[in-house]
Image (cartoon, rainbow, N blue to C red):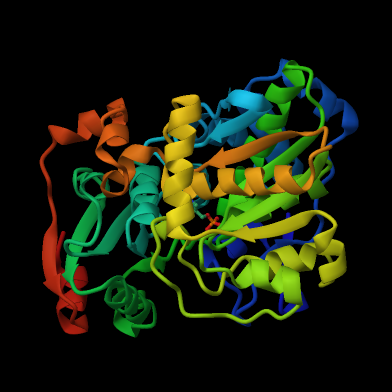
């Protein structure tokens, strides 16, 4: 598999280089030089395949020249080891639940696949891979649990002290083994600065093989196509063949993967890009002006992104044309108040509790339905995290209904292990050089 940089089509690298660099030197993003096309017969027959079989066939279409089939199959079977069911609510609308993995959010798909792909390329005897991540909550948990016990790798996570939710903190700090957590007395931006400085530190780079496991890594995008195909397969089983996906979007990786799936031949009728008030993309779709903004804090905080880094990838898939893009994507944005109302309404009408990100996607479905009353396709909104990760947002009556999954109950008995550091580079570097 070959990839090019979105800033320079002549900058072509192979897959291994793309995953370990994450970002090309020219600051573009890696994209597949050729997007494989899945056959119509594959798509029609998916309803007879398991999720893992579907995922394997798609991964093979990308990576058949790069990773031998038996090894790829093992990677898929280890990485995609939890379900992604579509759940029917009232009026033939479906929730695609992507939160059944270890960190209870859809980022598990990307993180688990990427960790095992990286593990595959690091051969025995090579320098161990050191992953450094700064997190405001969700990404760190997925990366930590994704890399847990992957041989030849070690993860160091930095998070802002006191600023992640209790469940997130458990996910970050109870792993031990090859995962280390550091609470930084500062903000998420401080954490990110420390990590960035470490990446350009010659002494650290001499001693360690550092990587960022960044969210824009192409190895995180590919596995996110799997669940769009699998959702379609589940709907085919119910006799549904026309689908509209609504995706709660922040950095636009999730919906980017959906569009990639569509480019690969998945028959999607429409994508709804639903955002919170970080509305750079809905505004661009409406006006044609892409104006990056500083992010605003909202209830759906994993979507608080004012300049979505995957947006260039999406533009590339439409040859840069907003007109082409608008044929398949519509953008909507919602306030916190609307988000909370949506959580209450879904609970009242369906007895179904969603996280604030998912509520934004459901609002997108409702708005689209209102303006297209004759639409015959079925709606699927992506449910990106388990509601128990955001306990502070729910009214008491709804919070009481949230069932704590076993992944969290298992963590509660475990010992927390965390180093505490100031937001100061000298101290962080000293930790990296001396801690074991
Ligand atoms: C990261 C995240 C999102 C946003 O996904 P993008 O790929 O960044 O658009 C939505 N919901 C949850 C729960 C997330 O963790």
| Side of 276 where 104 appears, left or right | left
The residue nearer to you, when weighing 217 against 141, is 141
Q: Is residue 134 above or below residue 68?
A: below
Q: Quadrant of residue 192?
A: bottom left
| Side of 370 where 43 appears, left or right | right
Q: Is residue 390 above or below residue 420?
A: above
The residue nearer to you, when weighing 146 against 358, is 358
Q: Is residue 366 above or below residue 182?
A: above
Q: Quadrant of residue 313?
A: bottom right
Res 319 visible: no
Q: Quadrant of the N terminus?
A: bottom right
Res 289 visible: yes
The residue nearer to you, when weighing 186 against 356, is 356
Q: Quadrant of the C terminus?
A: bottom left
| Side of 294 where 233 appears, left or right | right
Q: Quadrant of residue 409?
A: top left
The spot of residue 198 in percent (x, y) is 32, 77
Residue in the picture at 71% in, 81% down: 289
The spot of residue 100 in percent (x, y) is 44, 31
The spot of residue 130 in percent (x, y) is 35, 61
Total marks in image: 0
Residue in the picture at 12% in, 61% down: 419
């Amino acid at each position: 598999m070959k990839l090019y940089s979105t800033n320079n089509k002549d900058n072509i690298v192979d897959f291994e280089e793309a995953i370990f660099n994450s970002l090309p030197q020219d600051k573009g993003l890696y994209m597949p030089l050729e997007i494989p096309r899945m056959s119509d017969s594959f798509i029609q027959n998916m309803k007879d395949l398991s999720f893992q079989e579907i995922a394997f066939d798609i991964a093979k279409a990308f990576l058949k020249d790069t990773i031998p089939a038996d090894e790829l199959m093992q990677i898929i079977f280890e990485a995609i080891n939890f379900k992604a069911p579509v759940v029917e609510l009232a009026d033939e609308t479906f929730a695609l639940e992507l939160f059944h993995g270890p960190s209870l959010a859809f980022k598990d798909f990307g993180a688990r696949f990427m960790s095992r792909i990286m593990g595959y390329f690091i051969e025995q005897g090579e320098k161990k891979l050191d992953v450094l991540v700064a997190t405001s909550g969700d990404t760190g948990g997925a990366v930590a649990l994704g890399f847990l016990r992957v041989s030849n790798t070690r993860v160091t996570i930095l998070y802002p002290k006191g600023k992640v939710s209790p469940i997130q903190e458990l996910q970050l700090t109870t792993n031990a083994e090859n995962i280390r957590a550091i609470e930084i007395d500062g903000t998420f931006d401080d954490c990110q600065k420390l990590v960035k400085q470490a990446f350009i530190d010659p002494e650290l780079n001499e001693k360690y093989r550092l990587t960022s496991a960044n969210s824009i890594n192409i190895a995180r995008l590919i596995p996110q196509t799997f669940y769009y195909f699998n959702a379609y397969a589940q709907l085919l089983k119910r006799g549904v063949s026309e689908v509209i996906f609504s995706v709660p979007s922040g950095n636009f990786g999730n919906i980017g993967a959906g569009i990639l799936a569509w480019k690969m031949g998945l028959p999607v009728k429409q994508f709804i890009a639903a955002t919170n008030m970080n509305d750079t993309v809905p505004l661009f779709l409406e006006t044609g002006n892409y104006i990056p903004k500083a992010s605003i804090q909202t209830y759906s905080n994993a979507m608080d992104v004012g300049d979505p880094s995957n947006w260039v990838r999406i533009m590339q898939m439409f040859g840069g044309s907003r007109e082409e893009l608008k044929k398949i994507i519509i953008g909507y944005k919602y306030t916190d108040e609307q988000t909370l109302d949506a959580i209450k309404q879904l609970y009242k009408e369906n007895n179904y509790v969603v996280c604030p990100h998912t509520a934004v996607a459901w609002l997108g479905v409702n708005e689209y339905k209102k303006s297209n009353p004759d639409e015959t396709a079925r709606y699927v909104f992506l449910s990106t995290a388990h509601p128990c990760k955001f306990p502070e947002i729910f009214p008491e009556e709804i919070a009481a209904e949230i069932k704590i999954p076993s992944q969290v109950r298992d963590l509660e008995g475990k010992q927390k292990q965390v180093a505490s550091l100031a937001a100061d580079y000298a101290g962080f570097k000293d930790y990296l050089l001396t801690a074991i």
